[in-house]
Image: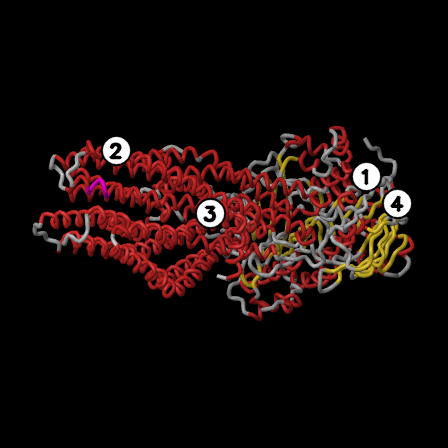
Amino acid sequence: MPLASTSWLRQQARPVRGVLIGGLLAGSAQAALMCAGAWLVAHLLAQAIFHHRALASLWPLLAALLPMALARGALGVAQRRACFDAGAKVSMSVRLALEQRLRALGPLWAAQQSRGDIVTRLVDGIDALVPYYAGYLPQLAFAAIVPAIILACALPADAWSALVLVATAPLIPVFMLLAGRAAEQASQRRWKRLRRMGAHFMDALAGLTTLRLFRAVAREETFLAATGEAYRRETMAVLRIAFLSAVVLEFFATVSIAVVAVLVGFRLLWGKLDFESGLFVLLLAPEFFLPLRALGTQRHRKMEAAAAAEDLTALLQTTAAPAAGALPATSQSIASTQIGIAFEHVSFGYGAGDVVRDVSLAIAAGERLTVVGTTGSGKSTLLSLLMSMATPRDGRILINGEDLTGLDLDGWRRHIAWVPQRAHVFHGTLRDNLLLAAPAASAWQLERALHAAALAPVVARLPRGLDTPLGEHGRGLSGGERQRLSLARAWLRDTPLLLLDEPTQHLDAATALQIDTALAQLAQGRTVIRIAHRLDAIGAHEQVAVMAAGRVVETGRAETLRHAHGAFARLLAADRAA
Amino acid sequence: MNLNHSSGLLHRLFALLRSERRAMLAGVLVAVLGTLAGIALIAVSGHFITAMALAGASGAAINYYTPAALIRLLAIVRTLGRYLDRLITHDATLRLLARLRGWLFGKLAPLAPARLAALHSTALFSRLRADIDALEHIYLGVAIPLLSALAVMLGTLTVVLVYLPWLGAGLLVLFMASAWWLPAWTWRSGQAPGSESVACTDMLRELADDGLRGRAELVLFGAEAMHAERIAAITTKQQAARRKLDTLQAIGSAGVMLTAQCALIGALLLGLPALHAATLAAPDLVMLALLLPAAFESIAPLPDAWAQLGASLLCAQRVFALADTPPAIEEPISAPPPASSTDLAIRQLRLRYDDAPSWALDGLELDLPQGARLALVGPSGAGKSSLLAALLRFYPYQGSITLGGIPLEQWQGDDVRARIAVVEQQPYLFDASLRENLRLGCPDASDEMLHTAIAQACLHDYVASLPHGLDTWIGENGIRVSGGEARRIAIARALLLDAPILILDEPTEGLDAVTASTLYESLAALAQGRSLLLITHRLGKLSALVNEVAVMRDGSIAEGLSVAAYQARGATAAPAMPAALDRQALNVP
């Protein structure tokens, strides 16, 4: 196990130290009460057997056992609660820290991640941390505290028995350290392989259709059976040895009880010990090893937590190349119904190669610009930079003459509506999905947006209209419906700047036409930047910027560029050759 | 869930695992033996020291060899028992795991994709994962503790009945209370918070998904703070539910401890008068006083085990229901007569999904003679993917499809799929090396064959750029593969299948123009001597691959025409976005 993840786990425990100590105190009080109870029983039996006292004179002592048991129960519940709270607090703070991290990493980073992987880390990974704080850490402390309390009680009663316990107790950690380290490593390897085997199985299930397509089902079945059996054989060969070390603990625990019993028995026979003390020590002996044994059952939880911590710290330490959204000290707010934009020598990159190189462009308020270029030429990145989802490495972007980095970002973003290639549909109702874009929208505005985006017929078809749940649990939206939702959001936002990122690329011709028509309405009177992929459909009077390898290589009216034998003409020729 | 139903599920689960029953039984026996030896060790020790003390006090002679030897024996049995217990139950668990996974895989395979909704939903899939996980723990987490506790209770009751019959009656009640009523109460009370916790976890999963896929929208809409607040709110709710569950468990174990103390008090209440009346020997009383609390220790895991049993049965119910789903396609029993050609003929094809109100395919007619090259063009939702599903024998249909003149129903699904290679729209890449992924349809392919396919799929530069070439790990735990690369891997994978019919489902979607244009040539070369069915919503440059075009609309073929004719018309019919933008006269309601 990498030391880093274990020390990270410990570090997270720091803020909940108080809660954990509370839990430890409750647990220690419980152990003390257990000792008192044991003494009471020993005393009772000694009085009855050797002093021939009847129940009539002993019942107050007997009755005292009940409140003691009740108190132990209450302390036990308190201890569990405190430990649970520690785990809950850590998981909450880690979850929020991760959300903070995702926020800092930004949308550009998020778009590149594997969905299943991150979701598993964020949900199951964090859940795997909890038992470390609620179970393993407290148990680790109890393994030291409880035996100490018991020893303190046993020592005055019978020094010899206490000596037996003391002599065997340290042998256990020493032995576990000697025999256990190799065993622990072996068990970690085993555990990792088991996890990998489980992952492989789930992978095979997820890809069942593909397996059927390639007639690989029978082969996979044989493989699964073979790996399962091979794993079992190998594991059992290792376990025969590995469990021996675990048995050492069991052996000492058992033998010391037996030794204490025999030792106490003979000293009672020889009259060297009074019965009360002997019985008391015998009652305590099994309790002495209980916390150590319980620790063993918690070990796999620690391994699971450490594995999860490894994944989570990797995420927490991830840095996106140029961090976006660092607010400057003085941020100017912007409020305008007219937006003019200028890119001045803007460059941006993710590290190795720049995605946008020295781009200069100007779009006057109310104007339209169409950006074209092959995939990967940096078109979408221009929009991301404009939305401040990334900050230019060089150069600056001016909004109505003000540097974008000096603006209040939230205020600036309120001026933007964006229709991406594939809009995200959030889990929730259709209404939630619309109002996310404009929480204050009135019913009338909503209605207007629905009609303008041609979403009204879709809503009419939905079983519960606007309140139909969408997303995985609910109904999915088709590509066209999704884009209409995105358009309706843009309508609701009603902003002076409209950014369109190939909004009809994934749509068939008929749906694309509907979306285009609705877009035309929306574009009126606004500043529009549109990324287009169908070059032959660009109007003659369109202002066009052609991008290649991150640079703007041509700008001008489409009509002019068509005859210029430049980059645009070449792209057009390639498109038409299709 | 009623008792009958539960026992039915358990019975079925046991029947499924029958082949491993010897290992399972051995594990239970050894576990029980170890536990009983541990309890007996304590009880016998108590008896021994009392007898020794009495002998010491009275000066009477005593046979201490037998009890001392018994104590040693029990210590050995317990230690050895624990060792064998861990070893044998581990072995049994691994056997169960292999058996269960093999069984489930065999059951689920014929259901994909038509009847396996879990494949289309992250949430359902993660639930399936959790269900399998729970079933895999049913032996170690449920069966062993329940059976051990049962054995301990029976053994203890027998001993107590011999010495103090009345105590036996009381003990029976206490056992019932701690092993049955108390767990039943905690389980019942845990139902509501339990489902609340599951619902919250599902919601957190959705929020995590939204936070990843919808991050740009959250940023733009200024909704990130709200998103974080929702995460915090749902986490708080989830934790409140879990705390209730945890407290219930804590109360459960406190309850067991309390009943154990009650048993001890009861033993003293009945035992002290019996001692006084000389009907019970002092060593026997001490033995009972030590036996009872020790016995209750093996009941302590019961609330947890019962709760797990309830949850596991629900999981078993879901898994069995899934496994019992009849496959969408009944495979024919007899092998088909050998087909001389690979002509595909489709007549009056209709297909409807289970819960859909309308037909996805409705009266489709199509011919794909051997060697023909046809493009199927149509808008999304026209039924292109449904046709693919029918052709691949994944979904049942009405009407007729013949392959080589023989109805598809008479073919084994695998024989059909041996003749049709498909490049899927969203290819699934396995968590394995690139080599393994490529060899999927052709496990014996040599490196030479792999490299030929790689070259044909324009994947050469990509493979050369990989750190370990063909042995580079891809998929969930490997390096990230872009959409375009995944498509090319899928193309190479399909090439290696070497089937007479090739179906390309949107082959250039997600590839940039340059890569796509290099691909057209390899695809054209590849299609030589094969029938080709190209499925796309936009023909574009792909037209070079085909001779004919079938236009699909609303589940049937609207018309069939030559590529030239289609293109001539396409040029005039293409929708023009900026033209639409220029139309300023549209009304805003």
Looking at the rendered structure, the kind of residue marked 4 is Ala
Label annotation for residue A522: 1
The reply to whether residue B376 is visible in this rendering is yes
Q: Along the polypeptide, which appears first: circle 3 or circle 1?
A: 3
- In the rendered structure, the answer to whether residue B417 lies left or right of residue A81 reads right
Q: Along the polypeptide, which appears first: circle 3 or circle 2?
A: 3
Please identify, in this view, whether the residue under mark 1 or under mark 2 is nearer the observer.
2
Please identify, in this view, whether the residue under mark 2 or under mark 4 is nearer the observer.
2
Looking at the rendered structure, the kind of residue marked 3 is Ile
Q: Along the polypeptide, which appears first: circle 3 or circle 4?
A: 3
Dot 1: element: helix
Q: Which chain letter matches label 2?
A: A
How far apart marks 3 and 2 lie (CA) works out to 34 Å
The residue that label 4 is drawn on is A365
Q: Which chain letter matches label 4?
A: A
The residue that label 2 is drawn on is A60
Looking at the rendered structure, the kind of residue marked 2 is Pro
Q: Quadrant of residue B154?
A: top left
Q: Are marks 3 and 2 in contact (CB under 8 Å)?
A: no
Please identify, in this view, whether the residue under mark 3 or under mark 2 is nearer the observer.
2
Q: Residues within 10 Å of mark 3 (few under 14, many from 20)?
A: some
Q: Along the polypeptide, which appears first: circle 1 or circle 2?
A: 2
The residue that label 3 is drawn on is A21
| First to last magenta residue range | A42-46
Please identify, in this view, whether the residue under mark 3 or under mark 4 is nearer the observer.
3
Question: Which of B486 and B334 lies nearest the eye of the viewer?
Answer: B486
